[in-house]
């Protein structure tokens, strides 16, 4: 009896062991990527010869390649490199209902450049964006996942259409109520007419609600004040530059005083004084302060460089212009006219600004400040094309002094962490969303290898390079 029981027990244990070992491999997957070199963006290491099994839009299997897995589709990735899908942490969908279709047609351009997630930084197309998200989740539309702020918060008679105007604590609470009702992913503040009190009050009120905040800072506020209230990120580097001045307090006071006159001082009027009073010691203190308060920075070097060169660059023959609808191209005219009207002194100053901004990048990285890669592509931002502009941003970050690994972090895991999505995205791991890019060459050796895309997987669906070309050709305008 004891012998028969022992044999039965051993047989059951063997069945459990065999089932446990063979279970994942024996299951059928929607997509298998076999023999890939998987790039770990957190460590900068490559895990050679890995097989990834994808089921129902998530990574369900990740191990050293061995026996073939059963799958509806299999990709042989020998010699190629698999990275997490890229995140563009600053884009815009805007221009009103008349440009909604033109904005929607930009979505495939992101996928075609390996961008599987974007952060919409405020506009006037929120209802359309939520509809696109539903369509993409249902497989009816190809495009990146979209995190959105919905309408921006600004002051009375705000510059951008669709902004929620705030002045009083009551208006701040009503605006945040409406954003929470929309279920936005974060709060975007803008500085065109917002008061110091409303800006800081909105940050504090959003912080109490557990909402993430970011934006452009009015020059009536110091970056330290905003960070201490709970600002989670500052967009662009103009506001950081002011915080690196050894006269920031007096410059801030001058701007505040000017608001009571007929000639209030704006950002660009104050910038030369800010630039002249830059102090490396103050900058180092500022970077440490940002690290302490966990305030991230979105440098957007690419658009700053493009706008600096706009007066002397002819974009009429840009190949990407063919994918931009005429309605969106018409929104470029304001910036283009402004650039062409610049004096030689202004053009020279903008070049100096670019050099200073570039110098910030390695210092911020060394100080431990979180960097988020964003392109600022979208209507009104002249010739900053969706997709390719983020790749340009990463190349500029590397040229500024980051390693390719650090640049990739700024466009993957850093964005996921900032938007509290790192438990489901940002790296390649079992259980995470199947948003990955298969490259022909190793991006850790040269960041420009991000251009050599063999395939993109978005929400578990495979888009080989020919399919990506078909998607963008379908939205070509000329």
Image (cartoon, helix red, strand yellow):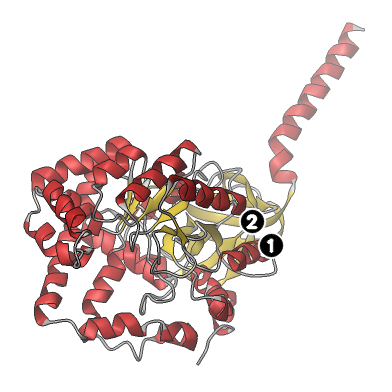
For residue 265, side relative to residue 273 (left or right): right
Mark 2 is surrounded, within 10 Å at the Cα level, by few (under 14), some (14 to 19) or many (20 or more) other residues, namely many
Disc on res. 440: none
Residue 218, given in percent of the width and then of the height, sits at: 28, 56
Locate the N terminus by quadrant.
top right
Disc on res. 73: 1
Residue 352, given in percent of the width and then of the height, sits at: 12, 67
Residue 66: tell me if it is visible.
yes
- Residue at 87% of width from left, 10% of height from top? 3
* Quadrant assignment, res 431: top right
* Nearer to me, 270 or 239: 270
Query: Disc 2, disc 1: CB below 8 Å?
Result: yes
158 versus 476 height, above or below: above
Q: Which residue is mark 2?
A: 32
For residue 175, side relative to residue 410 (left or right): right
Residues at marks 2 and 1, CA–CA distance in whole angstroms = 6 Å
């Amino acid at each position: 009896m004891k012998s028969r029981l022992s044999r039965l027990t051993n047989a059951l244990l063997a069945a459990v062991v065999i089932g446990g070992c063979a279970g994942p491999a024996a299951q059928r997957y929607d997509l298998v990527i076999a023999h890939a070199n998987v790039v770990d963006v957190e460590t900068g290491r490559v895990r050679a010869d890995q097989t990834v099994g994808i089921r129902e839009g998530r990574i369900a299997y990740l191990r050293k390649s061995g026996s073939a897995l059963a799958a509806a589709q299999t990709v042989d990735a020998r010699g190629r490199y698999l990275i997490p899908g890229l995140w563009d942490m600053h884009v815009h969908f805007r221009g009103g209902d008349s440009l909604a279709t033109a904005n929607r047609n930009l979505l495939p351009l992101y996928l075609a450049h390996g961008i599987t997630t974007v952060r919409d930084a405020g506009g006037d197309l929120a209802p359309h964006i939520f509809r696109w998200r539903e369509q993409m989740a249902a497989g009816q539309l190809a495009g990146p996942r979209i995190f959105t702020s919905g309408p921006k918060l600004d002051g009375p008679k705000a510059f951008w259409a669709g902004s929620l105007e705030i002045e009083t604590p009551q208006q701040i609470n009503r605006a945040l109520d409406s954003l929470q009702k929309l279920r936005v992913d974060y709060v975007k503040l803008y500085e065109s007419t917002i008061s110091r009190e409303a800006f800081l009050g909105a940050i504090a009120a959003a912080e109490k609600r557990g909402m993430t905040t970011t934006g452009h800072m009015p020059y009536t506020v110091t970056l330290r004040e905003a960070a201490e209230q709970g600002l989670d990120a500052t967009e662009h580097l103009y506001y950081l530059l002011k915080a690196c001045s050894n006269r920031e307090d007096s410059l801030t006071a001058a701007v505040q005083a000017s608001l009571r006159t007929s000639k209030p001082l704006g950002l660009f009027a104050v910038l030369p004084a800010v630039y002249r009073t830059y102090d490396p010691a103050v900058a180092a203190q500022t970077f440490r302060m940002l690290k302490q308060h966990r305030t991230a920075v979105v440098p957007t070097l690419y658009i700053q460089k493009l706008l600096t060169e706009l007066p002397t660059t002819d974009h009429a023959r840009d190949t990407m212009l063919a994918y931009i609808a005429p309605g969106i191209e018409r929104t470029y005219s304001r910036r283009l006219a402004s650039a062409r009207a610049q004096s030689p002194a202004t053009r020279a100053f903008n070049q100096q600004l670019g050099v200073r901004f570039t110098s910030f990048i390695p210092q911020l990285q060394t100080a431990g400040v979180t960097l988020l890669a964003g392109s600022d592509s979208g209507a009104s931002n002249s010739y900053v094309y969706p997709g390719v502009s983020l790749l340009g941003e990463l190349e500029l970050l590397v040229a500024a002094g980051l390693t390719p690994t650090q640049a990739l972090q700024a466009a993957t895991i850093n964005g996921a962490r900032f938007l509290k999505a790192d438990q489901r995205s940002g790296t390649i791991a079992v259980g995470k969303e199947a948003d990955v890019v298969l490259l022909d060459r190793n991006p850790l050796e040269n960041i420009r290898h991000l251009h050599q895309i063999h395939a993109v997987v978005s929400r578990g669906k495979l888009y080989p390079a020919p399919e990506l070309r078909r998607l963008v050709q379908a939205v070509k305008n000329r």
